[in-house]
Each structure stands twice: as C-alpha cells, then as structure tokens.
Amino acid sequence: MANSVYKVIELIGSSPNSWEEAVSNAVAQAGQELRELRVAEVDNLDVRIENGKVTAFRAKVHVSFKYEGGD
C-alpha cells in the first residue's frame, strides 16, 4: 500500500430540518470543490433559536481528503 497524506478542513453545515441533513449539506458542498473525500467527523451540534423556536440545525464537521500538494 502506498503512503498517503490527508488534509482536514472544518466546515459548518446547516439545515432547517435536521442535524443529519446539516452534515450532508456540508459534505455535499465539500464534494463539489474537493476530490477524494475520505472521512467526515462530526465535532459539535447546535441549533439556532428564534422567538423560542428552533429555526436551524448546525453541525461542525471535520472533512478529510487526499492531499496532493500545494495549498
């Protein structure tokens, strides 16, 4: 197996419906810009509250992808 290096970035996904959808939104957006996504790790979950009601679910996600040099 060849040696590989992976880079990790932090994203915050949001959704009006669920934390799962918030994570999916973050990963989908990353997938539009980055190749060879490997792992997404959920670090933190929170909600936005307006007028006493939950209006958005947010998830802080660390996404790793194969590093090919540069920055």
Image (spheres, helix red, strand yellow):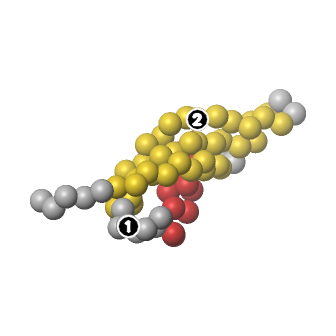
Q: Is residue 69 visible?
A: yes
Disc 2 crowd rating (10 Å Cα; few below 14, some 14-19, many 20+) is: some
Disc 1 crowd rating (10 Å Cα; few below 14, some 14-19, many 20+) is: few
What residue does disc 1 label? 69
Amino acid type at image mark 2? Leu
Relative image position of residue 33 (x, y in whole percent): 51, 69
Q: Is residue 62 left or right of residue 47?
A: left
Task: Residue at 35%, 67% (x, y): give it.
Answer: 68
Relative image position of residue 37 (x, y in whole percent): 39, 60
Could you tell me which secondary element the residue under label 1 belongs to? loop
Amino acid type at image mark 1? Gly
Q: Is residue 4 left or right of residue 64?
A: left
Task: Residue at 64%, 49% (x, y): give it.
Answer: 14
Q: In the rendered view, would you say 44 is above or below 62?
A: above
Of residues 68 and 49, the one drawn nearer to the viewer in this rendering = 68
Q: In the rendered view, would you say 69 is above or below 48?
A: below
Discs 2/1, front: 1
Between the residue at mark 2 and the residue at mark 1, the CA separation in whole angstroms equals 31 Å
Which picture quadrant has residue 44? top right
Relative image position of residue 3 (x, y in whole percent): 19, 58
Task: Residue at 50%, 56% (x, y): give it.
Answer: 27
Q: Is residue 10 left or right of residue 69?
A: right
Q: Residue furthest left?
A: 1
Could you tell me which secondary element the residue under label 2 belongs to? strand
Q: Residue furthest right?
A: 51
Q: Is residue 59 left or right of residue 39?
A: right
Task: Residue at 71%, 43% (x, y): give it.
Answer: 56
Q: Which mark is residue 45?
A: 2
Q: Which mark is residue 49?
A: none
Relative image position of residue 39 (x, y in whole percent): 37, 51
For marks 2 and 1, the one nearer the N-term is 2
